[in-house]
Amino acid sequence: MKTKRMHAWFGHRCRFGRGAWMILLPCMWLGVGAGPAPPLPLASDSAYYPPPESAGGWRVLDQADAIRERGGMDPDKLDALGAWLRASDNRNFAAVVIRQGHIVLEVERGNSSKTDARRVASVSKAVCATVLAIASERSQQGLTPRRMSFEDRAFDFIPWASPLSDARKAAITVRQLFNHTSGLCPEATGAPNDGTWEYVLGLSGDPRTARLAFDPGTACGYSTHALHHAALVCETVTGTPYDQFAIDALFRPLGIEHWWFQFFEGGERIGRHTTHGLGMPARDLARIAYCMLRGGKWGEKQIIPAWFVHQTAAPTHTVKSPELRWKLNPQVFSHGWELPARHDPATGRNGAGIPADARCKPGSGGQFIAFVPSLDLVVTRQTGSSGDWAYEEYLRRACAACR
């Protein structure tokens, strides 16, 4: 019996999973394997949540029949998706496809899907918004030093930015930090995304960070700087540095075990603080998407607020003019997450073949996190690199492999 699909292309590893052979071989040795195969369990198990990787991790399917019946996927299309992933670029990467709580495809080239906590670039924006939703929910329950909703003014929680370099900054809401309508240093300006906190907060004399590119809520300009601001909002609301709150409120409850955070330095008045930037392995990123897929629950606990999961399913602003840098349909942007089905092919990004309820976040270098509730599907990829990649094609092919 062939128990594991393994292909080698110049040292690349591709597998539909590990572990099943460790169960099958002892059973055959005991004589249990003789006779008709036992019936497969039910395809969907909404009560399933994976233990941490150190305690066994995600359950894995590596047999074609099990992938087809239990995972609800077409094994041949998954083979083709694995080949596409390897041919899509030359970067080292780890990619995972999870259907109905099972890993049905895992492809690694150089990176480990379990332990390589490399930089995930803008995928960290979706993580940051999710963390801020938890902070907001806890604040409304009186569990934090300050109360905060996404409609509150963001700079009320960023005392380090005073005096404001542009009076219009006072009108920016927390929500606008996430959906790229704040006007804070859009990437279209060409300004570096990294620097000191004085630079990011507009206090260094650089006009690109000192002045808003547009009045808040009137246009869409993709902004990494805005999410750096969000990390400071979290620190004030919770009374805890952003990284520590994210670890305690989201990472550890989901069994995430590997991560790192980016920090910026500041002068004596501002000091050193965490940004929203982070690194995380592909399998651990999948836990965040899976929690979103399950309505924010992990087991019996509501980890991510249900209202946040619901609100990410639609644009969170009314801007219709194209995004400033890539001229994208602005209706793609929600609370840190994006709505890939809304991409206009005229912009070079195509949402065809992707369900309307899909949410994702791409990051430079081919980083990717996505979940599709209607298909019970989670898709991630992590490289640690930079540059363009065919994000929607990955998700489209994964969706097409669902039966």
Image (spheres, rainbow, N blue to C red):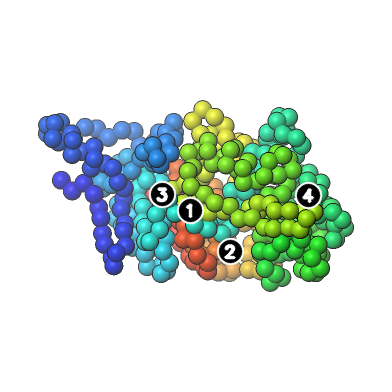
Label 1 SS: loop
Find the residue positioned furthest to the bottom: 190
Q: Residue at x 78, y 46 (%)?
A: 157
**Can residue 235 be seen in the rendering of this structure?**
yes
Residue 351 lies left or right of residue 208; in this view the side is left
The answer to which of marks 4 and 1 sits earlier in the sequence is: 1
Q: Circle 1: is it few (<14), some (14-19), or many (20+) Cα within 10 Å? A: many
Question: Quarter-wise, where is residue 36 in the image?
Answer: top left
Residue 337 x/y as whole percent: 60, 51
Q: Is residue 226 above or below residue 133?
A: below
Residue at 31% from the left image edge and 33% from the top image edge: 41
Say which mark, if any, is on residue 114. Answer: 3
Q: State how far apart marks 2 and 1 are (Cα).
A: 33 Å
2 vs 4, front mark: 4
Give SS at disc 3. Answer: loop
Under mark 3, the amino acid is Lys
- Mark 2: amino acid: Asp
Q: Which mark is residue 117?
A: 1
Q: Disc 4 and disc 1: Cα gap in Å?
A: 29 Å
Which residue is rendered at x = 78% and y = 49% of the image? 158
Q: What's the CA distance linking mark 2 and mark 4?
A: 36 Å
Three-letter amino acid code at the position of disc 4: Ile
Please tell me how crowded label 3 is: few (under 14), some (14-19), or many (20+) other residues with Cα within 10 Å: some
Categorize mark 4 by other alpha carbons within 10 Å: few (<14), some (14-19), many (20+): some
Q: Secondary structure at mark 4?
A: loop
* Relative to 294, 21 lies left or right: left
Give the spatial CA distance, label 3 vs label 2: 34 Å
